Image: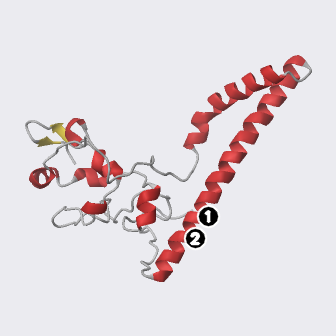
């Protein structure tokens, strides 16, 4: 067990072809893991349903088996969601999104200090394919954070986004105005406490 006072170990930054190979290799492993995990979850639900059905009725009934399997899946889904897993954002073409919130970020940054850039969210396959927005290797595919908790693409001095043109769909559609983690009162420009 590690001492909590020890600094977090960070992987060295790797650029160029090695970084691309590493990203591609990890993505393949994570995709396979997601597939195996899904298959295992389905097999577990079916086995549980089969056992319950055999015990309850003493024989197999296809309709009853399917009903029980569905009940077990619904019962186990919250527990399954809590386990470690690879996260991926919903698929949107982030460049074709419409109806996005109109928030004057440049005007607000001196007040809010880009607190939204401290939030965790998964990237999409579109983000991964572009290879611009970085993700945490220890938490695939969550946007990568600096040691201070800010997004690695958020300039720590100006708080501007260094990948604004390629920013993820989560950033594009996020509306901070009613988020109490960011603003106590958006209209009065009163930020939430740090």
Classify residue 120 as left or right of residue 20: left
Q: Residues within 10 Å of mark 2 (few under 14, many from 20)?
A: few
Q: Residue furthest right?
A: 58
In the image, what residue occupies the spot 55% across and 42% down?
82
> Residue 36, position in %: x, y?
69, 52
Q: Secondary structure at mark 2?
A: helix
Image quadrant where residue 146 sits: bottom left
Q: Which mark is residue 102?
A: none
Q: Which mark is residue 25?
A: 2
In the image, what residue occupies the spot 78% across and 32% down?
48
Classify residue 26 as left or right of residue 35: left
Classify residue 23 as left or right of residue 100: right
Mark 1 vs mark 2, CA separation in Å: 6 Å
Image quadrant where residue 147 sits: bottom left
Q: Secondary structure at mark 1?
A: helix
Q: Is residue 5 visible?
A: no
In the image, residue 184 above or below residue 13? above
Q: What's the image's color scheme?
A: secondary structure
130 and 79: which is toward the camera: 130
Image quadrant where residue 69 sits: top right
In the image, residue 164 above or below residue 88? below
Q: Are marks 1 and 2 in contact (CB under 8 Å)?
A: yes
> Residue 80, position in %: x, y?
61, 40
Classify residue 29 as left or right of residue 90: right
In the image, what residue occupies the spot 66% across and 32% down?
73
> Residue 182, position in %: x, y?
22, 43
**Which residue position holds label 1?**
29
């Amino acid at each position: 067990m590690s001492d909590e006072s020890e600094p977090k170990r960070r992987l060295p930054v790797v650029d160029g072809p090695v970084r691309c190979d590493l990203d591609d290799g990890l993505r393949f492993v994570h995709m396979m893991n997601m597939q195996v995990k899904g298959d295992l979850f389905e097999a577990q639900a079916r086995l549980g349903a089969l056992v319950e059905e055999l015990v309850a009725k003493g024989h197999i009934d296809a309709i009853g088996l399917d009903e029980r399997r569905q009940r077990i899946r619904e019962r186990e889904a919250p527990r399954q969601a809590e386990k470690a897993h690879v996260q991926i954002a919903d698929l949107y073409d982030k460049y074709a999104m419409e109806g996005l919130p109109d928030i004057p970020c440049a005007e607000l940054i001196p007040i809010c200090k880009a607190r939204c850039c401290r939030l965790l969210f998964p990237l999409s396959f579109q983000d991964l394919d572009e290879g611009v927005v970085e993700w945490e290797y220890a938490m695939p595919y969550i946007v990568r954070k600096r040691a201070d908790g800010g997004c690695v693409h958020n300039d720590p001095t100006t708080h501007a986004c260094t990948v604004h043109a390629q920013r993820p769909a989560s950033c594009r559609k996020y509306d901070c105005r009613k988020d109490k983690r960011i603003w106590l009162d958006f209209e009065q420009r009163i930020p939430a406490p740090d």
